[in-house]
Image (cartoon, helix red, strand yellow):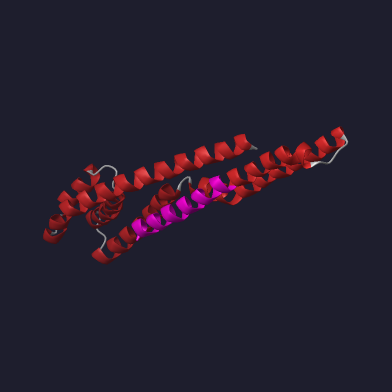
Amino acid sequence: VVVVLTLQAVASLAVAVDRLILLVRSQAASRAFAHGAAPLLEKGDFAALLDQAARAKGSHLAALMYTGLKVYLDRVDAGDDAERAADLARRAIERKGESTSDELNRGLNVLASTGSTAPFVGLLGTVLGIINAFQMIAASGSGGIGTIGAAIGEALIVTGYGLCVAIPTVLDFNWISGRISRFEM
């Protein structure tokens, strides 16, 4: 039971660190892209903006901008009117936004699952430990606290360990989910 809880804790920590690194890098890259893209957008230099978006690595904002701008310019070049091209670009941005959201949320199910199951895994360890304590009573023929006290104390530690894994994991999940939601907006 302790091994399972430790694996859950390590997996949750890995996901939390990975998502935080992704968010920090993307925010920095997106800010840098936005700073360089604003003057091009104001001038209406869409070709240069498209080129800059294509070169911006790690920026989810640049990826969305590239998708929408590419579709728009391709449709205008193909002879579509601006309104139709804009509608198709909006749809392409929505699809790209959904895939970006999936990418940002990847692995969060590990945090959610760990947060919800770790207390029960710990409780399972406690139940198994108490069963062991009762087996010790049966084997020794006496029911004194000296016989089972250590075994019950050890069994309760596993529940505490399960809570120590679950509580920070739930807090991490909520905090990262909130950051992703703000980032998506």
Residue 84 shown left or right of residue 164 in the figure: left
Residue 118 locus on image (x, y percent) = 60, 46
Residue at 20%, 49% (x, y): give it.
Answer: 32
Task: Say whether residue 168 is magenta.
Answer: yes
Q: Residue furthest right?
A: 141
Q: Residue at image x 81%, y 35%?
A: 136
Q: Where is residue 45 drawn, in percent x and y?
A: 13, 55
128 above or below 39? Answer: above
Nearest the viewer among 56 and 172 is 172
Q: Is residue 141 above or below residue 120?
A: above
The C terminus lies in quadrant? bottom left
Q: Magenta segment, which residues?
A: 163-185
Q: Residue at x 23, y 52 (%)?
A: 31
In screen coordinates, is 113 left or right of 55? Answer: right
Dominant SS type (magenta): helix
The percent coordinates of residue 86 (x first, y second) are 28, 62
> As rendered, which of 98 and 143 lies closer to the eye?
143
- Quarter of the figure with the N terminus: top right
Residue 169 lies within the magenta run? yes
114, 142: nearer the viewer: 142
